[in-house]
Image (cartoon, helix red, strand yellow):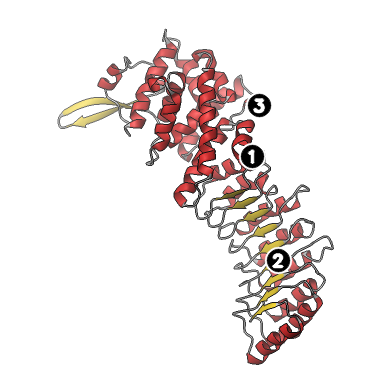
Amino acid sequence: MSYNPSYCWILVLTLGPFFTQTHRDPQRVPKTITQLYCYFIYNILKNHGREIESLREVLLRVGQMAFTGVAEKNIVFTDEDLIKYNLQPSQFLSGFLMELLEREDSARSVVYTFPHLTIQEFVAALAQFMTPHRGDITTLLIEAHGMTDGRFEVFLRFVAGLSSPRAAWILEEFLGKFPNQTICRVSDWVKEEVKRQIRNTGSEFGKRRLLNTMHYLFESQSPILAQQTLGSVEKLSFSGLGLTPIDCAVLSHAIRLCDTIKHLDLESCHIQCEGLQRLGPALHNCQCLRLGDNDLGASGVKLVSVALRNPDCKIQRLELQRVGLTDSGAEDLASALSTNPSLKGLYLSGNKLGNSGVKLVSAALRNPDCKIQILGLDGVGLTDSGAEDLVSTLSTKPSLTDLYLTHNFLTDRCVPALRRLILNLPRLEQINLRANKFDAIGEKELRSLQECRPGLRLDV
């Protein structure tokens, strides 16, 4: 869950003993970054706060200093900064700040920094949540979200996360009840911001802003809030936007909570197997799933196959163009296809399937329950012998309306098979055969088939 893998290791070392001793309830295992950092801060307060009389006030002063640093892009603090916020170095403070020796010319001085920027951002969020700057948390959120350089991005995620009772409960021992008015105002702001960003996803910047606000939903862990903001949304498109594994987890969370989301477009999002693994639990809920131009490979497609096998699978259109699938990795997909009754459109163009990979797929489509209507196999390395097997299968599929076989290696030898296919499927509306190896005679014979099928669009 950490934004920095090396820091995740530090957190595990710090929090590991804590979880194994007194809080082993699986319901208390943190699901978000905010929940994790609440445990982290609790650990410091529990083990280093005994010497401090006004523990809450000191922590909030540290947080106010941290917030000023976030706002000013400052991660290094001096003795003057500590004095300004009425803070003094102590064993307690050392749980938050590290001392660094700084040399200027011949003089030496001590400066302070948080062990990691995310600790500074979390403590800043905690202070603003408990005692918001100028007393108005909504104004603060609007101003912070309006900054386009990203300085408040993680800070805002923490603020949203602190509105969740599951995150705050452990800190109440030291900080008291979290103010209900602030919780309500933060939730209302998140709700309105997500709704506003949904309307502005025509650009990459707009998509990124929407994704950031969806992180707020994830951190809040509120099913009601997610349904209020996304309950009427049918399509989410982040095509062309690079997504991290945590981004994928955020999307999965939203889709699982909001069954209205039917169309998920993640084409060219640089998703790899790890990201798809985070998305996995939600994929079967989508009717249209666009995953083309991502480096999924066989292991990633295997995860998609799990979604296809789900008894509640709703996927009707599946786009897997250019995802690095080969014939050796097609077996899982074929097995899933053979048991899936919902799929109507399958796009596998640009994968190196070869004849063997297309045999596997066509064999799976023989299932009588399969109602395939659109099949995209452009540029998959198909030859005449593979086309014979494919045609043999598709000839038994009266539901087929569109077939794409461009940029393969088909020659005049497979023209009779294609002729049978066209004549046997009265609902076939389009067959695209451009950029193959037909000679003039073969092309002429194929075009002549349009005379007996006036409604057919045939591109050779």
Q: In which quarter of the image is residue 380?
A: bottom right
Between circles 2 and 1, the one closer to the viewer is 1
- The residue singled out by tag 3 in the image is 27
Please tell me how crowded label 1 is: few (under 14), some (14-19), or many (20+) other residues with Cα within 10 Å.
some
Numbered label attached to residue 231:
1
Residue type at tag 3: Gln
Between circles 3 and 2, the one closer to the viewer is 2
Q: Would residue 363 be seen by someone viewing this image from the given angle?
A: yes
**Front residue of 340 and 108:** 340
**Front residue of 163 and 242:** 163
Name the residue located 64 percent from the left edge and 86 percent from the top edge. 438
- The residue singled out by tag 2 in the image is 374
Q: Residue furthest bottom?
A: 441
Q: Which of marks 2 and 1 is nearer the N terminus?
A: 1
Local secondary structure at mark 3: helix
Q: Which of marks 3 and 2 is nearer the N terminus?
A: 3
